[in-house]
Image (cartoon, rainbow, N blue to C red):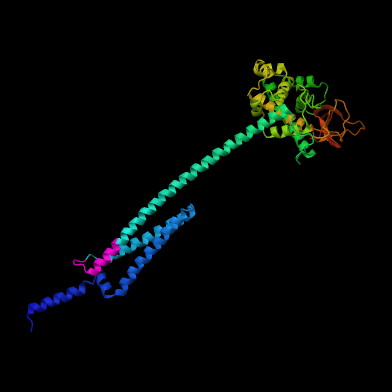
């Protein structure tokens, strides 16, 4: 029989064992399969991390941003898994007072894996830094591409200007050369419409400036073409459009457009090349490159006859702009730039007319001529025709007509004495 004190001691030890459960480490010792499964998870995770690292390296050669992002996310995922395993082990395995050889081996293995983990973390940060550098290089290359495209556009623009100057000055080209398919009657009709619109567009600032300068527009319209009976007072604008038309198309029927070219002959192919060179260009840019080109001489000859000296004096208070143009300059004033758009459209139409074989022929309609629907089109719609047999009479020609072989492009006219159906 044991002493009473000994029994109490045994009872307390027994109770102590019941209150405090065994550590997981002891359970792993008692259950090797659990330990093997835990270590297997660690090695599986490490293998997956190595595989993801290889994918990241492969994605750099050749450089593939999408594959790099996928591999990067995979590495981060595996690192998180390893971290979770580490925390799980630490929480369930408090450090024992005395460590067995088997535990020391396991701790060393875990330390080795943690060291490898830190290595991978460093490599991931390195690759992330490289990705940022590559992205920066890509942005720089994109900027260089954009700058190169801007330079290319400028070079193409300069080449077109030089081509225009060479074609005008040399008049070179094969006499029997062929024209591109777009040299068609439809192209010429489109150019006629553009010229007609340009006349209308330039008349607007001209009339507005006359109003601002205090001109009597009724008297000015009558001085251009007297005794025209207008259906509406607003229709007197067609008198100013007729004035612009008559001045701009003077000399259109000859190939040099009544400009002195020093006996320079230009063949049809060169006419068309001049059209193509100027078509998409800003006229002021063209004249800035070569103010004494044939187009420059054309503008210089037409501006003084379209804009009367009295008009210009009333607009600007002097004739400085007029004198500057006559001396060979091309001012950058808004009014002169508006005139250049008009001049360009008429010049392009002339270049096209001379590109056809035979040349496109121009015809004009005199005031008082009987209206013919075959050769004329009224600029005013909804006219009320008189029931008498007398045909309407032309009061103003606003745009000339043209013949392209047997094709007729009708002139635009204002009919005098007509009524409009409101």
Between 75 and 339, the residue placed more toward the observer is 75
In the rendered image, residue 98 lying in the magenta stretch gets the answer yes
Instruction: Give the dominant element type of the magenta stretch: helix, strand or loop.
Output: helix
Q: Position of residue 306 (x, y in %)?
A: 74, 22
Can residue 99 be seen here?
A: yes
Q: Position of residue 220 (x, y in %)?
A: 76, 20
In the visual, does 15 lie left or right of 311?
A: left
Which quadrant of the structure image shows residue 204?
Answer: top right
The quadrant of the picture occupied by the C terminus is top right
Which corner quadrant of the image does residue 413 belong to?
top right
Per the rendered image, the range of residues in magenta is 96-111
Residue closest to the far top: 318
**Does residue 414 lie above or below 47 as drawn?**
above
- Up-down relation of residue 309 to residue 386 (above or below): above
Task: Say left or right for 29 vs 174.
Answer: left
In front: 165, or 136? 165
Residue 244 % position (x, y)? 75, 25
Task: In the displayed orientation, state which residue is furthest to the left.
Answer: 3
For the residue pair 153 and 365, the one nearer the viewer reads as 153
Kindly identify the residue that appears in the image at 40 percent across and 60 percent down.
77
Above or below: residue 95 compared with residue 193: below
- Between 28 and 151, the residue placed more toward the observer is 151
Residue found 73% across the figure and 22% down from its top: 302
Residue 226 magenta: no
Residue 296: x, y in percent? 70, 24
Residue 203 visible in the shown view: no
């Amino acid at each position: 029989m044991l002493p009473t004190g000994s029994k109490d001691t045994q009872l307390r030890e027994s109770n102590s064992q019941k209150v405090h459960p065994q550590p997981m480490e002891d359970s792993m010792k008692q259950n090797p399969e659990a330990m093997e499964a835990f270590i297997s998870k660690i090695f599986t995770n490490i293998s997956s991390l190595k595989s993801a690292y290889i994918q990241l390296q492969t994605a750099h050669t050749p450089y593939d941003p999408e594959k790099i992002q996928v591999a990067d996310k995979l590495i981060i995922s595996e690192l998180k898994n390893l971290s979770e395993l580490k925390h799980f082990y630490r929480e369930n395995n408090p450090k024992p007072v005395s460590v067995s050889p088997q535990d020391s081996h396991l701790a060393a293995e875990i330390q080795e894996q943690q060291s490898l983990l830190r290595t991978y973390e460093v490599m991931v940060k390195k690759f992330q830094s490289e990705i940022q550098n590559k992205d920066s290089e890509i942005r720089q290359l994109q900027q260089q591409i954009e700058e190169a495209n801007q330079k290319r556009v400028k070079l193409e623009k300069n080449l077109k200007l030089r081509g225009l100057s060479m074609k005008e000055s040399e008049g070179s080209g094969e006499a029997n050369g062929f024209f591109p398919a777009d040299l068609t009657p439809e192209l010429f009709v489109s150019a006629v419409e553009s010229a007609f619109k340009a006349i209308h567009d330039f008349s607007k600032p001209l009339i507005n400036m006359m109003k601002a300068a205090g001109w009597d527009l009724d008297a000015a319209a009558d001085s251009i073409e007297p005794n025209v009976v207008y259906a509406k007072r607003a229709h007197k604008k067609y008198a100013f459009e007729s004035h612009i038309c008559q001045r701009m198309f003077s000399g259109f029927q000859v190939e040099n457009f009544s400009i002195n070219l020093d006996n320079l002959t230009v063949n049809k192919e060169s006419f068309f090349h001049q059209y193509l060179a100027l078509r998409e260009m800003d006229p002021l840019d063209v004249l800035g490159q070569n103010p004494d080109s044939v187009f420059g001489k054309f503008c210089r000859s037409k501006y003084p006859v379209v804009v009367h000296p009295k008009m210009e004096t009333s607009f600007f208070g002097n004739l400085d702009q007029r004198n500057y143009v006559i001396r060979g300059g091309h001012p950058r004033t808004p009014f002169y730039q508006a005139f250049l758009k008009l001049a360009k459209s008429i010049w392009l139409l002339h270049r096209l007319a001379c590109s056809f074989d035979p040349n496109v022929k121009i015809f004009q309609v005199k005031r008082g001529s009987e209206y013919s629907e075959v050769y004329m089109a009224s600029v005013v719609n909804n006219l009320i025709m008189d029931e008498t047999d007398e045909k309407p009479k032309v009061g103003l020609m606003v745009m000339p007509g043209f013949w392209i072989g047997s094709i007729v492009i009708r002139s635009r006219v204002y009919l005098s004495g007509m009524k409009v159906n409101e």
